[in-house]
Image: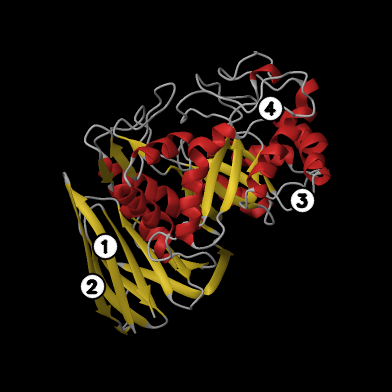
Amino acid sequence: MELELFTTYGTGTWQEQFHQTVSFHEDQGTENQVVNLYPEVKFETLEGFGGAITDAAAYVYSLMNETQKRQVITTYFSPDRMKYGLVRIHMDSCDFSTEMYQAMSEETDTELKSFSFARTEKYIIPMLEDAQKAAGKPLKIMLSPWSPPAFMKTNGQRTYGGSLKPEFRKMWAEYICRYIIEFEKRGYQVQRISLQNEPKAVQTWDSCIYTAAEEKEFLRDFMYPALQSHGLEHVEIFIWDHNKERVYERICEIVDDSTKDMVTGIAFHWYSGDHFEALELVRNQFPDKKMIISESCIEYSKFEEADVIHGALRLSHEIIGDLNHGMTAFYDWNLLLDEQGGPNHVGNYCHAPFLYDRNEKKLMPQLLQQHFEHFSHYIESGAVRIGYSKYTEQIDVTAYEKPDGKIVVELLNKSKDIFPVNVRIQGQVAEILLYPESITTGLIE
């Protein structure tokens, strides 16, 4: 039995990737520096990985030449590279749009005759089409609204929160259905929706507030019936779509006997910290509900723009922790941004796995992309998480059995020290070293 290793690490301003193979030998009673793998202990099945095709990402994509476009798309979506099969797309504008827009603005148009899909078709659809061709299969789309049209809201604007006016709840549900229908009639597969992106956040950009009671009522009395009336029962509904510190309370407040069959799961973001224990609570109390991370990125307002290594380590730590506590799907935020971390119509700039310098016309792959590829390339859709134990908190570990029977283990060394590890599985041991601030993928046949 052999352990094939793929490592990405770096210190300062450089990164290195290398590949090596280590042989297993019979365990002679190794006790120290051990990472145990237990393939016989199985948990949930992974759906897969993906990211967001935002208006901003798709606009930057439109500026690149064909070679650069091909590099981005094949890296993310081809079966030979990152194997992304999931895509999140915003309905109407979000902060990562070149401008604010909405598909219609006629308050009295209850039949949505003035609804226009043109703004989505301008940038998002061309990038989505290229992505699907590179994947060689239908991509599964998650649609999320940042705000209803301004006329539907209590504050009369897309920005600064506000709430959905009760008299527009039916019309808003029809509006969301219309978005689904527009994608599906163009041949795309809408797998799921969330009811509202970040329903607790009052933002300078597109935002809308829902209390748990309001979200529950909209779901039960308007959104779910609207999906049924349009024959869209196949579209999964996810609640919350906000940070993890309140994920348990939210699902408890919304899911009861009247809504449990309407809710497929709960979506969450990473911006308020780990809160892996909250996911464990959800998994234990609501074992039939899926948990997905629908958005995560390095915000320049919170993290140092130049500190790309620790940014990648933070997000890899996040992914591993979420996987180990029941997450079955991961969506990165913008797949591509410009050299500023935009465009963003309110200047809320962020990092992305690919940046594009508009002045130099240069595509700049980032360390974050290499980290994400460790997960999405090796932990394929259909992989089943298995049991493990580790000897130190300085490293993060997760492990899966792939559909072909191979075992994949992810090892993240967050420290500046070299860590020795004895990988132990089924009476066999292999000795490896984890390099400082590195991520290593191990494959066992």
- Residue underneath mark 3: 233
Residue 20 is tagged as 2
Q: In which quarter of the image is residue 35?
A: bottom left
**N-term-proximal mark, 4 vs 2:** 2
**N-term-proximal mark, 1 vs 3:** 1
**N-term-proximal mark, 3 vs 2:** 2
- Residue underneath mark 4: 211
**Which element is circle 3 on?**
loop
**Which element is circle 1 on?**
strand
Q: Position of residue 349 (x, y in %)?
A: 37, 29
Labels 4, 3: front one: 3
- Residue underneath mark 1: 7
Density class for disc 3 (Cα within 10 Å; few <14, some 14-19, many ≥20) is some
Q: Could you say which is closer to the camera, residue 116 or residue 259? A: 116
- Which residue is found at the position 74% from the left and 43% from the top? 255
- Relative vertical location of residue 305 with respect to residue 39 in this rendering, above or below: above
